[in-house]
Image (cartoon, rainbow, N blue to C red):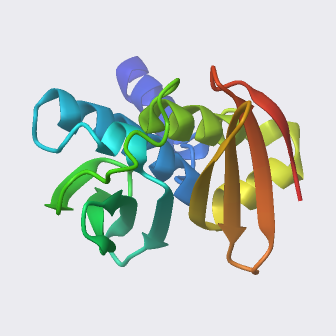
Amino acid sequence: MKKLVFLAILAFQATVFAKAITPMHVVEKASYQIDALVKKQKIDQSFLTDINQVTVVQTANGFMVQLFAPSAQGQDMNLLQLGFDSTARATTANVHFVGASSQSPIFNQISVAEILDLGAEAFVDRLSESEENVVVAENVTAIQLLKAADGVVLKINLKDSRVYTVNMDNQGNVVSKGF
């Protein structure tokens, strides 16, 4: 009987305290996948230095993240598509690679995987600190990565067409953020 009560309490706690998966959580998970796929030599290393745009869409089965990078062919972008289930577990990875851009590397002091990881963590690890963090985490649709003289700028597009800006230094520390 004690075991049954204990298991019931554990199940209840798991349900109550289960963290809702937001699109920004999935961006964070995508950052891990980029790094892992490069290490396994499944995608070209330029994906660690050249991704300049990310989109995330909620699907019937979970999420689809598309990561774009300039290619050697100009208008034809390199593309990495990552599928995730509703628990943010990676399910698919498809790549369209034309060739690294002649401008490569775009980011050389910190990898794109680190930029996306640390940028996403600025929200998902701090959801309880402000309603603004929740709004951004739940409503992100696209992220543009821009190289700045002193780091990286993330322009985060939200479902309601607002743009949230995150300025990071070359070590990935968030220097400032806001609408």
Residue 103 x %, y %: 40, 49
Quadrant location of the N terminus in the rendered image? top left
Q: Is residue 170 visible?
A: yes
Q: Does the image show residue 22?
A: no
Q: Is residue 70 left or right of residue 6?
A: left
Is residue 133 placed above or below 67 in the rendered structure? above
Q: Residue furthest left?
A: 41
Measuring from the top left, give residue 63's x and y in whole percent. 39, 65
Residue drawn 30% across the image and 47% down it: 89
Residue 157 spot, x, y in % from top left:
68, 68
Q: Is residue 58 shown above or below 104? A: below
**Left or right side of 147 for 160:** right
Percent coordinates x, y for residue 39 in the rendering? 18, 27
**Which residue is painted at 36% across and 67% down in the image?**
64
Q: Quadrant of residue 35?
A: top left
Q: What number of labels is visible?
A: 0
| Residue at far front of view | 102
Classify the position of the C terminus by image quarter. bottom right
Give whichever of 8, 153 is nearer the camera.
Answer: 153
Q: Is residue 48 left or right of residue 129?
A: left
Which residue is more in the foreground, 122 or 99?
A: 99
Residue visible at 49% across and 61% down in the picture: 53
Against 76, is 89 above or below?
above
* Residue at position x 10%, y 42% in the image: 42
